[in-house]
Image: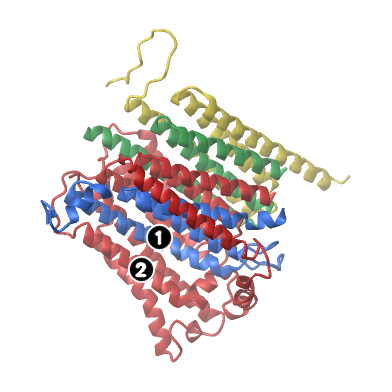
Amino acid sequence: MSAIEIFDLARTALGYGLLAIGSLAALIGAIGLLRLPEFYTRAHAAGITDTLGALGVLLGLAVLSPDLLTALKLIVVLVVALFASPTSCHALARAAFRSGVRPALDGNRPPPTVPGE
Amino acid sequence: MLFAAVAALFATLALALIRAVAGPTVFDRVLALNLIGTKTILLIAVLGFATDRFDFIDIALVYAVLNLIGTVAVMRYLIGEKERA
Amino acid sequence: MEDFLMIGLLLVLCATGIAIAFMRDLLVVAMLSGIFSFVCCAVFVLFDAPDVAFTEACVGAGVSTVLTIAAIRLTGRREKREGRRASVLGLTLACICGLALIYGTLELPRFGDPRAPSQTHVAPHYIDRTAEEVGVPNIVTAVLGSYRGYDTMGETVVVFTAALGVLILLGGAQSRPLRRGDAPARKDQDVVLRGIAALFIPMTLFLAPYVQFHGAYSPGGGFQAGAILGGAMILYALVFGIDRLNQLVPERVLRVIAALGVLTYGGTGVVTVLLGHRFLDYDALGARPAGQQIGLTAIELGVFMTVACVMIILYQRFASRGDQ
Amino acid sequence: MRDLIGLFPYWAVVVLMMTGLYIVIAQGNLVKKLVGLGIFQVSVFLLYITAGVVEGGTPPILNDQFTSYTNPLPSVLILTAIVVGVATLAVGLALAVRIREAFGTIEEDELQPLATPEQPAQKGPGA
């Protein structure tokens, strides 16, 4: 087996592995979004897996892509997604907290307050 | 293999839709909207690979940039509503 | 695989549509219509129509949901329950029509049939002759700008007219003073969001020209680029406040540019007539394919100017309107 | 089975079309009606795109690797229709906003008595 063949094989394996990780993360996030009890836990599940899912799938595709331009475009999409997805999740949780949605806590602890409010 | 990825992404999309319809708060729905947006981007990118047409990635790029707008618009509305009340 | 995905996506699309019918909270309706647009875009990609998917992505994600929400701010969020009689009547009518239409579909050519009448009439001409007659790889752009240039000019004029309609309906320059527009930008507002918006908006400004000028080679063109630019400006207004947007691009400037876009399109046609050819026959501008490409670039530029400015005007009008 | 799959997209189009029709007929809120009209519109878009698909074809962007292309004509028609659709949606929404400002409601059943000649609207638009 020549060096190029080994490289190609490794590339394919890596690409599909990343793709599998990404898809699995996406699926886990969706199950969390559906099954968890209240907004903040759901946001936690969705927010984290959203980023990891995008990272896995897009990086996997970039590794698999046949030419450099395609790989480059995928990396740009990835960078944008890595910025956008946590931002919107953060902004959403913040907006929810400000409009009075409070996390459901165990026991009798008082609900948290916004510092300076 | 690409088929498995497409199937997983589609399942994600369908599950998130259930959350978007069920609610109960508006924020849960926005969360689901956001998730569906990202999953559509990934689905389009994978579909481009499955059919060997890489032009589709441009669509994913545009979605990635514009996806934020809907979320921000809903949050703006809710903040404005609270201020008006 | 494609069959399963097609059936799945179409079922999700129908489920979203039916869910919209049941929702009473109009804000939720607007969000679900956003999801509807996402799924629809995926279906268009699956059905090999990337240009349509591209347009749906730009318009659905950037403009239409935002416009609906901006209108809900002015009209109220809660919907009344409809009367029982109306819903029974509507449901009966919809079921009867639906069954009749499904009966009608039995005669239609099956999905993907290459011998269907729609595939044998004019489409082979476009596919076979575009490379020679227009000389751009993207057949959709060629048909849009060259073969069916009249049609596209009509659509551009319709978009422009819609902006005029909104300008008339929602008051001119001398309308009542605004009590308060969209939620103003506040100092203590989300720092992260502002930072990311400051990063994304310039990026979008680069993306729009790419989509515009690469439209002959890949999905894209004036309509899409215009909607992207409009979306970027809407994001700017959402994060930094509508007043900042009004300062950045005053409406009187936008109105002039939108009109100039329509004039650029029509003017290209007039130039071809003056050069002794028919209206919008780009062969007048030079030998093939250079003449065709000059013509396409000119009209796509006109479309871009009109669509981008109209999208911004529409949002400005809704967002600057004060609460009643 | 092939036959059923071959007809499925049309049925999805019919279901969406009827959902839109139901919203426009039965539901009274004007903004909701506009959203229903949007669903109806999308069903028509889908019908056109469905009619353009060719088995084994690829998107209509010329490339030496491919010989069979999807019909470009529906793409052209629908691409412009989407942009026109959002522009007309804006006109409809602007009308709804003006109706709300003039009459205080956008529910159809509350508007109807206001529009009859016996009972003219109490207050016109501010302008």
Above or below for C189 versus C307: above
Determine which residue is flagged by label 2.
C158
Dividing the picture into quarters, in which one does residue C154 lie?
A: bottom left
Residue in the foreground of this view, choosing between D92 and D60: D92
Residue in the foreground of this view, choosing between C9 and D29: D29
Q: Residue at x 45, y 87 (%)?
A: C278
Q: The yellow chain is which one?
A: A
Residue in the foreground of this view, choosing between D76 and D19: D19
Q: The green chain is which one?
A: B
Mark 2 element type: helix
Determine which residue is flagged by label 1.
D85
Q: Which amino acid does label 1 sit on?
A: Gly
Left/right placement of residue C96 relative to residue B82 reads: right
**For the residues marked 1 and 2, what is the alpha-carbon distance in whole angstroms?**
10 Å
- How dense is the environment of label 2, judged by Cα within 10 Å: few (below 14), some, or many (20 and up)? some
Q: Which chain is red?
A: C
Above or below for A2 versus C309: above
Left/right placement of residue C324 relative to residue D8 reads: left
- Specify the quadrant that holds the C terminus of chain D: bottom left
Q: Residue at x 60, y 49 (%)?
A: B45
Q: Position of residue C316 (x, y in %)?
A: 28, 53
Q: Position of residue C76 (x, y in %)?
A: 27, 42
Q: Mark 2 lies on which chain?
A: C
Q: Residue at x 47, y 39 (%)?
A: B34
Residue in the foreground of this view, choosing between C245 and C206: C245
Q: Chain D is drawn in which colour?
A: blue
